[in-house]
Image (cartoon, helix red, strand yellow):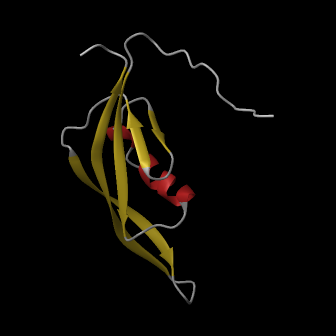
Amino acid sequence: MLRTNVFPVRMPQDYVLYHYHVDFNPPVPSAAIRKSMIAEKREMFGNFYMFDGMQLFLQLRLENDVSLLYVTVLVIGSVNVIQQNTASLKVQFQALLSNLED
């Protein structure tokens, strides 16, 4: 027996989503921490965004196809010393997802 979890998704007639890929430097192994880093920049993304840890979907297009963002992160060192480091996020446009006719 074959089962699937396919179901219809109703979308507005004129939806548009912009797909971006996000690279972190230094690499961040935790998706939860990557999500919190993106959340720090939410004012750039408008009222709505989706982020799965590497892929970012927006309802608006960013000004540049490649944007370099910086966030401050706190790192606990080996002797419980808290250090403040800067991480960069490279947000690169991938595709326009739309149901509008070209």
Residue at the farthest front position: 1
Q: Position of residue 94 (x, y in %)?
A: 30, 42
The quadrant of the image that shows the C terminus is: top left
Residue located at (57% from left, 84% from top): 80
User: Total marks drawn?
Assistant: 0
Q: Position of residue 75 (x, y in %)?
A: 48, 74
Residue located at (64% from left, 27% from top): 6
**In the rendered image, which quarter is residue 70 located in?**
bottom left
Residue located at (76% from left, 34% from top): 2
Residue located at (18% from left, 42% from top): 64
Q: Is residue 90 above or below residue 52?
A: below
Residue at the farthest right position: 1
Residue at the farthest bottom position: 79
The quadrant of the image that shows the N terminus is: top right
Q: Position of residue 56 (x, y in %)?
A: 41, 43
Q: Is residue 22 left or right of residue 2?
A: left
Q: Is residue 78 above or below residue 101?
A: below
